Image (tube, rainbow, N blue to C red):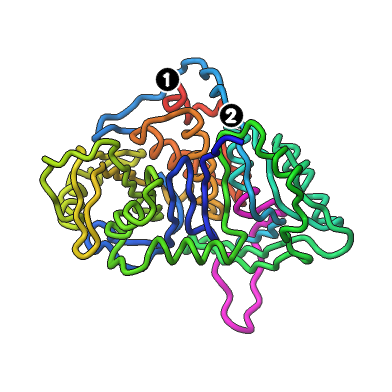
Amino acid sequence: MNHIPTVYSPMTSISKPFNGTIFHTHHSSSFPHQFRQHLHSHVVSITLRHKSIKISAHAVPPLPQNHTVVGFGMTTVDFLATVDGYPKPDDKVRTTSSKVQGGGNAGNALTCAARLGLKPKLISKVADDAQGKSILEELEADCVDTSFIVVSKGGSSTFSYVLVDTQTKTRTSIYTPGDPPLVPDDLSQSMLLSAFDGARLVYFDGMSTETALFVGREAWTQSPSIPSALVSMLLRLPNIKFVIVTLGEDGCLMLERSANEDVGLEERNVESFLELLYKEKDERLAIPTCISSVVTKFRVNGLGTVCGRFFIGTAEKIPDSELIDTTGAGDAFIGAIMYAICSNMAPEIMLPFAAQVAAAKCRALGARTGLPHRTDPRLASFLS
């Protein structure tokens, strides 16, 4: 079987598409100034070095020739409720709205990919209970191939309670894992070979805790900040083409390895270099943007150097009145990245495209309600 690029995301923290890796952080602020050591995310958000791309009414182009993708990970039922304020201990609060909808990192990301036109196959596990049936029906309605989902006799499917605070625009999730869990013996070799047949890439959401911890240690050991961690990733894992870290309202940061190591390039300290690059960011722009550097040799003291390019992707500035729920925003970003990889999008287009998809998701309650379809006019400029 031919080598298939992988997308890896342990516990919504890391994903690795097309020999690349995406990191999710939570609720970051002032990232450009401090390059915080601790990673934290959220959501979302074209301009090429500040050049706006106008929405066009052009017909949606043909789908990528190879647009089959495989996902491995969690799919759930989410019980969502909005409240005017998160309750204090022993408080009773009334919901302002509610929804029962499918969730789970892999389920959400593949639903996003399906709505964008890809053909996703999901490897996961549910029980033969009412929630398991609901999970399968919703995925199938979005054209996600569920034939590789293991259905256990008895047990319970994974579910989550999600409280969305309409004042702070935050959400709190209480997760209950399914039982029995998915184990290697559930997956035969013939089943996996059938799932991977014809796949353009494979996505892992970190359902395997042991694997997630291993990759996490490899990625972040001894890295004093996010930029140095990205350089460290490319140094420690030489087959990775690029790494992305998402930074919530601060957008995302991508480091792409250069195919040609030019020995004549001047070495630049990665921290000081990015401080200068961030000064090109136009805070007045509300639309998704991308700022790119030239190929440079980046140095991290005590670790080494990597030749490559940095890309700063900004988040869409969603008006407060339109921001409803950030649940699953990172999954939407990954689903869009999978489509971008299959379409061979340049990073300057890929990052704002993924941010636009994630921002659309945030304008509705639940991880899937707001996921755009391929024909959505908001995506026209990226797909034309």
Kindly identify the residue that appears in the image at 62 percent across and 80 percent down: 91
Whole-percent x and y of residue 115?
Answer: 61, 34
Q: Which amino acid does label 2 sit on?
A: His
The residue tagged 1 is 56
Front one among 310 and 208: 208
Q: From where the camera sits, is residue 314 visible?
A: yes
Instruction: Specify the quadrant that holds the N terminus.
Output: top right
Q: Distance from label 2 to label 1 (Cα)?
A: 24 Å
Is 5 magenta? The answer is no
Tell me the quarter of the picture where residue 138 sits. top right
Q: From where the camera sits, is residue 129 visible?
A: no
Can you name the residue that lies furthest to the right here?
153
Magenta segment boundaries in residue numbering:
83-107
Front one among 357 and 104: 104
Whole-percent x and y of residue 340?
Answer: 47, 33
User: Is 32 displayed left or right of 317 in the figure?
Assistant: left
Is 282 above or below relative to 92?
above
Instruction: Count every numbered label the image shows and give the total.
Output: 2
User: Is 184 displayed left or right of 301 in the figure?
Assistant: right
Q: Which amino acid does label 1 sit on?
A: Ser
Kindly identify the residue that appears in the image at 78 percent across and 41 percent down: 147
The residue tagged 2 is 67
